[in-house]
């Protein structure tokens, strides 16, 4: 398919997210990020996604009609980058989300790639959470607080005492958590976060607080599969890693996470008091996805000018034209 309005040069563009109305969601993704999605509750915004369960679409520069990110990358596979292409056999390797947990998410676990590909035919899920806000006393679940057996877990699920076996970890704004596949976990109510993960939508629920959905039905559990992939060893409560800001003219950055699936940096942009703008260029190795967490600004370059605001996600192809960033903003810079 050829669309003349979609410039074949490697230039950045804005994405419009897919919205998810899971029952535990709230309204902050519209209230705080002005995403203007007609969904309630608004639990997740899939801001950079090629997953068929929720694809992002190109929103600017304008195209003839809505074109999904996956369709765009099929037309321009070089935009993915050489390393990013190798991570998932040529398919887009990551999924980026904003998540508003008004109430607790289910206690759940994700399989690793080997199990997921063999049993489900898609990738497993290792993920990273960066906490944008948390109400006082907010907690998340990270693994078990002791070594457990499958029988103990099944009995605890059956009698509703599963939470006594779990590690409950206090959560604060700015916290970082890396959740490897196989780790039993749950995001607690009152937490707003950004999630970077493998491009997968596989979740095995162990426990869902006996809740029912808007139709009065309980959501399905997946205990048998969960028991095949869950790490039943005691998990030490995760400590926040040492983080170091590296300062340059007009911006500062810190590495949040690096694994075989993705790399995530937090960028603090501030060009209010200088004339020289911040240069930004991708190499041939990977695309970059810039998720705006706070503030606003612009991206400019050869034939490019994009304004960005809080909640926007900018896709920058591999080997993009030379760009410059301007504004006062906090962003996540995600690549592979």
Image (cartoon, grey):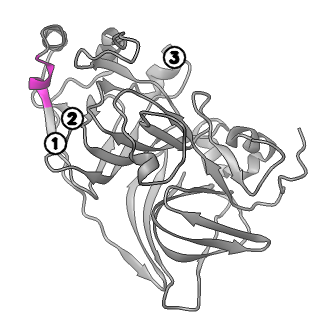
In the picture provided, is 282 more to the left or to the right than 78? left
Q: State the mark number for residue 141.
A: 2
- Residue 114 at x, y = what percent? 47, 24
The residue beneath circle 3 is 120
Q: In this view, does 300 lie above or below 222?
A: below
Question: Would you identify the image quadrant in which residue 92 lies?
Answer: top right
Whether residues under marks 2 and 1 lie with C-beta atoms below 8 angstroms apart, the answer is yes
In the picture provided, is 50 more to the left or to the right than 65? left
Q: Residue at x 39, y 18 (%)?
A: 214
In primary-sequence order, the first of circles 2 and 1 is: 2
- Residue 115 at x, y = what percent? 44, 20
In primary-sequence order, the first of circles 3 and 2 is: 3
Q: Residue at x 57, y 43 (%)?
A: 17
- As measured in the structure, the alpha-carbon distance from the residue carrying label 2 to the one carrying label 1 is 6 Å
- Which of label 1 and label 3 is nearer to you? 1
In the picture provided, is 137 more to the left or to the right than 83? left
The residue beneath circle 1 is 169
Question: Would you identify the image quadrant in which residue 216 lies?
Answer: top left
Q: Residue at x 27, y 34 (%)?
A: 103
Residue 259 visible in the snapshot: no
């Amino acid at each position: 398919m050829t669309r003349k309005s979609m410039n074949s040069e490697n230039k950045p563009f804005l994405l419009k997210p897919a919205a998810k109305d899971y029952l535990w969601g709230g309204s902050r993704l519209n209230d705080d990020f002005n995403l203007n999605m007609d969904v309630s509750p608004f639990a997740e915004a899939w801001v950079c996604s090629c997953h068929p369960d929720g694809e992002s679409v190109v929103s600017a520069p304008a195209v003839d009609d809505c074109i999904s990110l996956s369709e765009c990358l099929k037309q321009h596979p070089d935009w993915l980058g050489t390393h990013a292409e190798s991570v998932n056999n040529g398919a887009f390797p990551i999924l980026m989300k904003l998540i508003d947990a008004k109430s607790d998410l289910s206690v759940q676990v994700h399989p690793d790639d080997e199990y997921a590909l063999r049993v489900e035919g898609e990738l497993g899920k290792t993920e990273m959470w960066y906490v944008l806000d948390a109400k006082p006393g907010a907690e998340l679940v990270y693994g078990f607080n002791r070594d457990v057996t499958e029988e103990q877990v099944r009995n605890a699920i059956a009698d509703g005492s599963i939470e006594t076996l779990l590690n409950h970890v206090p959560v604060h704004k700015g916290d970082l958590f890396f959740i490897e596949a196989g780790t039993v976990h749950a995001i607690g109510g009152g937490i707003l976060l950004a999630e970077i993960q493998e491009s997968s939508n596989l979740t095995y629920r162990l426990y869902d607080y006996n809740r029912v959905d808007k139709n009065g039905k309980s959501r399905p559990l997946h205990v048998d599969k969960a028991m095949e992939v869950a790490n039943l060893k005691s998990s030490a409560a995760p400590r926040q890693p040492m983080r170091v800001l590296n300062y340059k003219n007009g911006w500062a950055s810190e590495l949040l996470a690096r694994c075989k699936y993705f790399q995530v940096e937090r960028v603090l942009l501030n060009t209010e008091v200088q004339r020289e703008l911040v240069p930004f260029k991708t190499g041939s190795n990977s695309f970059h996805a810039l998720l705006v967490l706070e503030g606003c600004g612009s991206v400019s370059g050869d034939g490019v000018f994009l304004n960005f605001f809080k909640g926007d996600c900018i896709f920058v192809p591999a080997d993009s034209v030379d760009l410059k960033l301007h504004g006062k903003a906090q962003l996540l810079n995600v690549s592979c």
